[in-house]
């Protein structure tokens, strides 16, 4: 499309525009459908991007940490803890090996059992937190050393936690993308219905225009222009309202809240202007196909 034709598309043709009702049910339906679907599209996109971001962060955190759990009789747990620390200090790839205090272990259990858990009276294992160095560690070799020198020690590299997390993130991203496809398809269907209704309601005007020599391409262009611009306007409003709503959602600071961190970060906000443009693109082709099909039936 050249600059001249694009300008003509935006300005329109006063004669051809007579075939398109400027107001009414079809105009309201097009604007509302585009606004509502764009509003939902913003949240579907935010969910997809947020899921990917959180999964990457959690996976990275779990990948660089590990835990040794000491389960032994009360009289032996201190000695086995010291033995496990000695093994870890001499293991390549272990940057930090730190025994978790009673308060830290209680903090880990509080989300599951509440703050009143009598941890001092429970036979809980002792936990040792490990942070890996830049070169990483040999997990299987460390397991063998611990089983030989510290019988009550169990090494956990969090691999069993990372795999379900990555799988869940992939499924949520796929669900978000599928939701965007459904939103686009629904928008196309609703705009097609509105265009068909407008064409049928103005059958007499179209008949008169044909009598004076107007071609179907000329008439269809007027419908395509009107419905595309209406969809663009509605989608812009819906996207702006959704962006405002996302901006006021709980942020990363409130980590204990539900759906905290849902939204966009940095350059992710640049995806939002694409939503109205995609809505206009869908409206353009949906109206074009509906117009030529209905004009053919009115012949």
Image: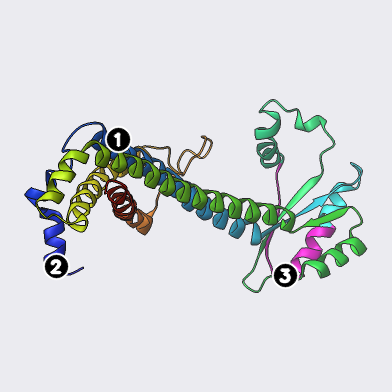
Residue matched to label 1: 29
Residue 174 within the magenta-colored segment of the rendering:
no
Which residue sits furthest top? 116
Any mark on residue 137, and which? Answer: 3
User: In this picture, is 266 found above or below 41?
Assistant: below
Q: Residue at 46% across / 51% down in the picture?
A: 181
Looking at this view, is 213 or 231 the one in front?
213
Residue matched to label 2: 3
Real-space CA distance between mark 1 and mark 2, rounded to the nearest whole angstrom: 30 Å
Q: Could you tell me if the residues under marks 2 and 3 are in contact, i.e. CB atoms within 8 Å?
A: no
Q: Residue at 59% across / 55% down in the picture?
A: 170
Real-space CA distance between mark 2 and mark 3, rounded to the nearest whole angstrom: 61 Å
| Image position, residue 133 (x, y; %) | 64, 68
| Residues in magenta, as a range | 83-101
Circle 2 residues within 10 Å: few <14, some 14–19, many ≥20: few
Which one is closest to the eye, mark 2 or mark 3?
Answer: 2
Look at the numbered disc 3 and give the secondary structure of its residue: loop
Looking at this view, is 222 or 53 the one in front?
222
Circle 3 residues within 10 Å: few <14, some 14–19, many ≥20: some
Visible residue check, residue 279: no
Visible residue check, residue 217: yes
Residue 87 within the magenta-colored segment of the rendering:
yes
User: In this picture, is 137 found above or below 286?
Assistant: below
């Amino acid at each position: 499309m050249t600059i001249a034709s694009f300008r003509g598309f935006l300005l329109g043709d006063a004669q051809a525009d007579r075939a398109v009702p400027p107001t009414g049910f079809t105009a309201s339906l097009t604007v509302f459908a585009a606004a509502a679907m764009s509003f939902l599209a913003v949240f579907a996109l935010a969910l997809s991007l947020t899921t990917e971001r959180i999964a990457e962060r959690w996976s990275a955190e779990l990948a660089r940490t590990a835990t040794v759990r000491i389960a032994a009789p009360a009289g032996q747990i201190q000695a086995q803890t010291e033995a496990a620390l000695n093994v870890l200090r001499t293991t390549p790839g272990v940057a930090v090996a730190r025994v978790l205090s009673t308060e830290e272990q209680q903090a880990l259990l509080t989300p599951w059992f509440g703050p009143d858990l009598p941890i001092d009276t429970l036979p809980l294992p002792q936990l040792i937190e490990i942070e890996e160095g830049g070169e990483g560690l040999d997990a299987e070799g460390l397991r063998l050393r611990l089983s030989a020198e510290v019988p009550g020690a169990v090494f956990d590299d969090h691999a069993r936690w990372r795999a379900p997390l990555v799988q869940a993130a992939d499924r949520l991203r796929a669900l978000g993308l599928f939701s965007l496809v459904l939103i686009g398809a629904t928008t196309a269907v609703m705009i097609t219905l509105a265009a068909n209704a407008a064409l049928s309601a103005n059958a007499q005007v179209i008949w008169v225009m044909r009598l004076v020599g107007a071609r179907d391409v000329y008439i269809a262009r007027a419908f395509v222009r009107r419905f595309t611009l209406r969809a663009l306007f509605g989608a812009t409003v819906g996207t702006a309202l959704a962006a405002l709503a996302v901006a006021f959602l709980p942020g990363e600071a409130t980590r204990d809240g539900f759906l905290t961190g849902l939204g966009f970060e940095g350059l992710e906000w640049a995806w939002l202007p694409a939503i109205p443009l995609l809505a206009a693109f869908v409206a353009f082709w949906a109206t074009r196909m509906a117009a030529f099909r209905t004009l053919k039936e009115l012949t």
